[in-house]
Image (tube, rainbow, N blue to C red):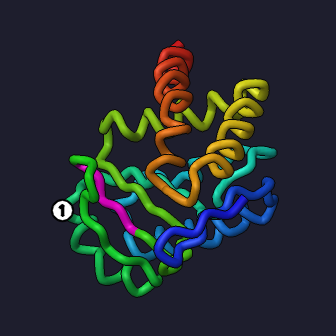
């Protein structure tokens, strides 16, 4: 399903096993650009869940020791093709986009112990461990894409109820 908004096509496509390889390649480049400040670099989002349809954008989560040191690496990260977006609406986050208008990668970086690190990992692991819920999410994303009438805000809103409910359940489940 494709959505065209301001010349940006947003697609929800079937799972592609190459997404993992794309992540691994990017992980190596980002680790080199960031250096020892990077504690963990993980594949998150729908492209990290085998069998789940997704927008073909690789989401990457980076845990760093220090955000100020990460900010010092902005030139190295930009040299990989990323646009440096700062917090971009989430306090304590550093956000980077790659791929221009048809984005190929999103990087979300947080300092150790930030709740957003746990939130992203818990949701991913929850979907992997609960295939029936992942299948429900798959269906919701495809329906949202077809019902949104080319409006990304509607698309996101149609998924939001599921995400809010299951993110909370994922955090409870992951904590146990």
Q: Which of 9 and 130 is in front in this view?
A: 9
**Residue 171 falls within the magenta-colored stretch:** no
Residue 54 position (above or below residue 70):
above
Which residue sits at x=51%, y=68%? 5
Q: Name the residue under label 1.
A: 68
When asked about the image quadrant of residue 128, the answer is: top right
Name which residue lies at 62% across and 33% down.
125
Magenta region's main secondary structure?
strand
Q: Residue 107, image x and y in percent?
A: 44, 61
Q: Quadrant of residue 162?
A: top right
- What quarter of the picture does the N terminus occupy? bottom right
Considering every residue shown, the one lying at the far left of the view is 68
Residue span colored magenta: 92-96
Considering depth in this image, is 23 or 105 the residue closer to the camera?
Answer: 105
Crowding near the residue tagged with mark 1, few <14, some 14–19, many ≥20 C-alpha atoms within 10 Å: few
Name the element at disc 1: helix
User: Residue at position x 44%, y 33% from top?
Assistant: 119
Q: In this view, does 72 lie to the left or right of 56?
A: left
Q: Which residue lies furthest to the bottom in this view?
A: 79
Q: Position of residue 9 (x, y in %)?
A: 60, 70
Residue 149, given in percent of the width and then of the height, sits at: 58, 55
- Taking 98 as reference, is 92 above or below it? above
**In this view of the protein, which residue sits in the foreground, 136 or 15?**
136
């Amino acid at each position: 399903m494709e959505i065209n908004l301001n010349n940006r096509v947003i697609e929800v496509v079937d799972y592609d096993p190459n997404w993992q390889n794309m992540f691994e390649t990017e992980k190596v480049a980002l680790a080199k650009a960031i250096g020892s400040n990077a504690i963990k670099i993980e594949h998150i989002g729908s492209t990290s869940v085998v069998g789940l349809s997704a927008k073909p954008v690789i989401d990457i989560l980076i845990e760093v020791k220090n955000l100020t040191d990460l900010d010092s690496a902005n030139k190295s990260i930009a040299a990989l093709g990323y646009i440096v977006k700062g917090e971009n609406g989430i306090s304590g986050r550093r956000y980077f986009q790659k791929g221009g208008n048809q984005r190929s990668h999103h990087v979300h970086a947080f300092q150790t112990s930030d709740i957003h690190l746990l939130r992203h990992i818990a949701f991913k692991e929850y979907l992997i461990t609960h295939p029936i819920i992942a299948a429900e999410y798959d269906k919701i994303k495809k329906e949202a894409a077809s019902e949104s009438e080319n409006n990304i805000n509607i698309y996101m809103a149609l998924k939001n109820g599921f995400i809010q409910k299951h993110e909370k359940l994922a955090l409870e489940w992951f904590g146990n």
